[in-house]
Each structure stands twice: as C-alpha cells, then as structure tokens.
Image (spheres, rainbow, N blue to C red):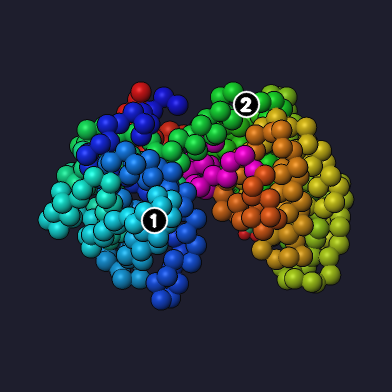
Amino acid sequence: MHKLSIKDLPLRDKRLFVRVDFNVPLSEEGRVTDDTRIRETLPTLEYAIRNRAKLILASHLGRPKGKPNARMSLKPVAERLRMLLDNVLESSCNVGFSPDCVGIEAEELSTRLESGQTLLLENLRFHPEEEANDESFARALAKLADYYVNDAFGAAHRAHASTAGITKFVGKSAAGFLMQKELDYLGQALQDPKRPFIAILGGAKVSDKIGVIRNLMGKVDALLIGGAMAYTFQKAQGREVGKSLVENDKLALANELLHEANERGVAFLLPVDDVVAMKIENDIPTKTIDGDQPIPDGYMGLDIGPKTIKLYADQIADAGTIVWNGPMGVFETPSFATGTKKIAQAIARNEDATSIVGGGDSVAAVHQAGVADKISHISTGGGASLEFLEGKKLPGVEALNNK
Ligand code: AMP
C-alpha cells in the first residue's frame, strides 16, 4: 500500500484522531444490538492505546440530517466500546464521551486526555457541515488532534469533513489496520489477481453495476451475472422475460456491454435456467425454466436455477480470485434464496482462492449460510468497495499521506 499506515505515525503522548465506522444498529432503548463494526476497529484502537496515544474517536450513526437527535447518539457505543476494550487489553480502560464533536468542551476533553485514554465524540452528522465537507468545521475537528487515522473504509467514498477535509489541518494522515486490509485485498484483486479471476455480480439493477462491469471487463477472465440484472441482459438479447424486473432504458447499454465482453474475450455468463413464480411470496408454486425458453406471461424470474448453480459453482471451483457483490435472487424470501446460498457455499469451498465479498446482501448471505469464516475478505463497505471496483479514487483514501 502506498499510503502511510498507523505504524508510520509517532503515537506516544500524541492526540490521535481516528475516524471509525461505529454506525451500528441500536434498539428502541438505545442498546447496541450488533457490535461487529466496533469489534472490527479493535486492532487499530488496541495498537494506538498500547503505544500510548491519546485517542479521539469520531463516527457517524444513522441519518440525523444535520441536527442533534437523541436516538442517534453515540453514547451507548462508548459503553460498549469500553467493555470490548477492557476485554482486549485485559485491564480497565478509560473511555470518555464528548457530547459534541466540536467546540470548547470537546477541545477541553481532548487536551485533558492522558496517554492511553480514549474519548469518543458525539455523532459527526449532528452538524450539516460534516457532509458538506465544510472547511471551518474540518478545522474545528482538526483542533482536537495532532495526527489523523482513517479506519472507516465504509465512509471512504465520501468527501466529508471527517474523511477528507480534516487531513489538511493535522500533522499527518494515515490508514488504520481495517482500512489497510480493505485496500490490500481489493487492490491486489485489481492489480495482480491470482487467475482465473472471476467476478459474480447480482442484485436488482444493471444501472448500479455498469461502472463495475466496465472496469472489471478489462481485468477479469469471467463475469457471472445473477439476480434481476440478468433479465435486462436477456431481454436485450431477445428473450421474453415475462414480468421479471427489467430496466427497459438500459437494453441498448446491456447489448453494448455484451458486445464489449465478446470483443475482449471475457466470458460473460448469464443464467441458463431460472426459478420463476407469479409473485414474490414464500412457498408459492414455482417453475424452473431453461434460459433458452421464454418466461411465461405473468411469471417473473426470482432466482437462478440448478443448472446455473452448477455452471457457476464449476467456475468458482477453478478460480484463483473471486469477487462477489449482489444476490442471485430475491434471497430475502426463502423460496428464492437457494441460488444465493449455493453460491456462498461454492465460494467457501474453494479455500485456495482469494475470495472477496462486498455489499450488504451478499455479506448477509455469507453469514446466513454459515460460511463467513471461509471467505478471505468480507468488505465492511458496500458502496466504497463498489466504487473501488469501478476504479474510482476514494476521497477518504486519496486524502491520506503517501508513504
Ligand atoms: P442491489 O441493491 O442492486 O444489490 O439489489 C439487491 C436486491 O435485489 C435484493 O433485495 C434482492 O431481493 C433483489 N433481487 C435479486 N434478484 C431479483 C430478482 N430476480 N427479481 C427481483 N428482485 C431481485
């Protein structure tokens, strides 16, 4: 990685501002119901504390739209963080909380911090200036610290005050361990993948994945398409797709992409059979239709069929690098979840490959299938990982100092 790492910063007795992603779900009573995102930053936090930095942590939570909102306070996160850090460090940890992320109180609390102590700031998005990447707000955040670390990969595709603006006003800016891991895995896949390199793309819309398809076309050996997206391609090729979800304004583009794949010699695989039904409802009658047959009127394609599962699983078994983003069907409804689950299992079986799974639905599917520990890298940023795969520069990464 060509960006500075937290290991390149002088930490002892320094105030270190760490942008984390503590955007965790809270219950009605304000309890953290899933602390995965907090636990994922622990290696970075533990390293900084053991190296005697004074830690200032900042995050967004939910969408408070630029106004304070008690239901989106990070206060409950401070308590959970304290428990988790106590565990990791095997000693009682000091985690304070600042009721605002900028201003006199935050400044006083940050200057009073002792080495090895932690201060969590209140939700950055209580201020509209955060998302506007406002310069004076970025300066106000920077006042709290000497150095900056970004460990919030999930927010790195946004140029906000805490992910981009702040870096102009602190000593040096570096990547945390979680950020580094994301960039290493995704970067390696794009720059020097073990071959064959395949990408499996699914989900509802072609339009969301055009950039990824275009960029990956020059890098992968095969693209495997599933989900509703497949029907836009099939309709473009002249198949009757019944009432399957189709983007009619993307048919010409779909043909262009198919043509481009052909020119470049990239295998562009579409489903060879589909599970269809009249409604999206569990346990309703379904049919399996071959891909060279029309989907009957009144029916829609809701999952890939068994032949497609086998075809895709064979490709996955032979791959050296696998990137997966987007479900193969309406996986939220158990009757149409088989394709997505089988793809997750097939990826898990190829333990020799580097496998990268991104996007909320595919990540959920990997957990539901119970194979998360068999995946090389589960990305913590759906939007950020897609933009990375599109070949875009992420503002939160660009803002960090080069080595
Ligand atoms: P995306 O956000 O584009 O990754 O799309 C994810 C959504 O696509 C999920 O909610 C799936 O239920 C939905 N989806 C996947 N396959 C289909 C399909 N064949 N028909 C309708 N929706 C689908």
Residue shown at 30% from the left, 34% from the top? 173
Say if 26 sits above or below 326 in the image: below
> Identity of the amino acid at label 2?
Pro
Residue 62's image quarter? bottom left
**How far from the left and from the top, in percent, is residue 310?**
84, 44
Residue holding disc 2:
193
Say if 240 sits above or below 286 in the image: above
Seen as rendered, the residue at the extreme front is 91
Q: Is residue 380 magenta?
A: yes
Residue holding disc 1:
86
Residue shown at 14% from the left, 58% from the top? 105
Ligand 1's image quarter is bottom right
Q: Secondary structure at mark 1?
A: helix
Quarter of the image with the N terminus is: top left
Quarter of the image with the C terminus is: top left
Q: Secondary structure at mark 2?
A: loop
The answer to whether residue 250 is visible is no
